Image (tube, helix red, strand yellow):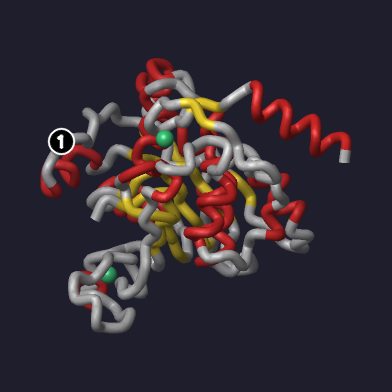
């Protein structure tokens, strides 16, 4: 009781800054400020999870500017279909085996509040945003994947020069809390997070602003596996912040499969198409 009163007083005197519009706002009384255990949120629809996990990060107006990836979409690559009256099915590219990844899923569309917070994390050095975003990504993982079927989770690697420039790999930061979240789920089996065996050994220019073909060429043969024993026979989940054309994920998946991976799937926070 006293704690609740103190929290309410704290919220009244110390407003928070919205990470999308930069305006100050007060937390609603009784708001759990995103600290709620993820185990209580795993069965929530993604939209509700977004509201609850991001409540202390976004103001009440910005928080509603979120678009979850909703059906109908391709059962394999996750691409949304324009015709909203169809049901989920495999798209033409996947039927023709143009997509190497077994399953691709994202939390939300790359727009609105989600885009703002990803930008804040990546380009404005707001590493504290990786915590709620990492939890949100974990909830998407629990929604779309069977915890028993993924052996290893690999964040899409940055080239060493980009890593030095930015100071962190945002994909790896998103996974930082995952071992604790797996433990919270009391799962007997949880995927290993491996950030060492897939490397981006060729420096590539930023994919931003490049068309689909240029993006493909830009990342061609850019990745390598350092220890194949960690890869052979595994179902690997690649993790990144944004899925745009999929060129980077495709190239990583090809490299992993060439080195013996059984399957490669992908999970990102946002999807641009
Ligand atoms: Zn706002
Ligand atoms: Zn598809």
The residue indicated by pointer 1 is 209
Q: Is residue 251 at all visible to an observer of this figure?
A: no
Picture mark count: 1
Q: Is residue 215 at all visible to an observer of this figure?
A: yes
Percent of width and height locating residue 154: 51, 46
80 or 247, which lies in front? 80
SS for callout 1: loop
Q: Is residue 180 left or right of residue 151?
A: right
Quick check: which quadrant has ligand 2? Answer: bottom left
Percent of width and height locating residue 147: 62, 65
130 or 179, which lies in front? 130
Check the image and name the residue furthest to the right: 2
As displayed, is residue 112 above or below residue 121? Answer: below
Q: Is residue 57 left or right of residue 96?
A: right
Residue 14 in which image quadrant = top right
Q: Is the C terminus in the top left, top right, bottom left or bottom right quadrant?
A: bottom left
Residue found at x 36% / y 74%: 75
Residue found at x 41% / y 26%: 22
Residue found at x 19% / y 70%: 82
Residue 79 in which image quadrant = bottom left
Residue 217 in which image quadrant = top left
Q: Is residue 83 left or right of residue 152?
A: left
126 or 204, which lies in front? 126
Percent of width and height locating residue 268: 42, 51
Q: Is the N terminus in the top left, top right, bottom left or bottom right quadrant?
A: top right
């Amino acid at each position: 009781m006293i704690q609740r009163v103190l929290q309410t007083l704290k919220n009244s005197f110390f407003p928070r800054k919205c990470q999308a519009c930069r305006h100050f706002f007060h937390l609603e009384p009784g708001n759990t400020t995103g600290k709620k255990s993820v185990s209580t949120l795993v069965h929530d629809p993604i939209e509700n999870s977004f509201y609850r996990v991001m409540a202390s990060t976004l103001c009440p107006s910005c928080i509603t500017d979120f678009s979850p990836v909703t059906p109908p979409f391709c059962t394999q690559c996750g691409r949304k279909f324009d015709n909203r009256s169809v049901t989920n099915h495999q798209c033409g590219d996947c039927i023709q085996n143009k997509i190497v990844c077994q399953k691709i899923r994202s939390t939300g569309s790359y727009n609105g509040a989600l885009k703002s917070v990803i930008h804040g994390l990546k380009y404005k050095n707001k590493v504290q945003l990786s915590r709620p975003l990492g939890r949100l990504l974990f909830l998407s993982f629990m929604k779309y994947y069977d915890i028993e079927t993924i052996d290893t989770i690999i964040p899409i690697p940055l080239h060493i020069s980009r890593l030095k420039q930015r100071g962190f790999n945002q994909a790896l930061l998103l996974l930082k809390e995952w071992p604790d979240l797996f433990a919270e789920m009391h799962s007997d089996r949880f995927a290993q997070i491996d950030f060492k065996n897939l490397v981006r050994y060729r420096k590539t220019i930023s994919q931003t602003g490049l068309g689909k073909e240029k993006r493909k060429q830009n990342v061609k043969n850019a990745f390598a596996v350092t220890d194949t024993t960690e890869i052979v026979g595994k179902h690997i989940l690649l993790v990144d912040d944004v899925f745009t054309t999929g060129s980077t994920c495709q190239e990583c998946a090809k490299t992993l499969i060439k080195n013996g991976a059984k399957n490669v799937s992908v999970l990102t926070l946002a999807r641009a198409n």
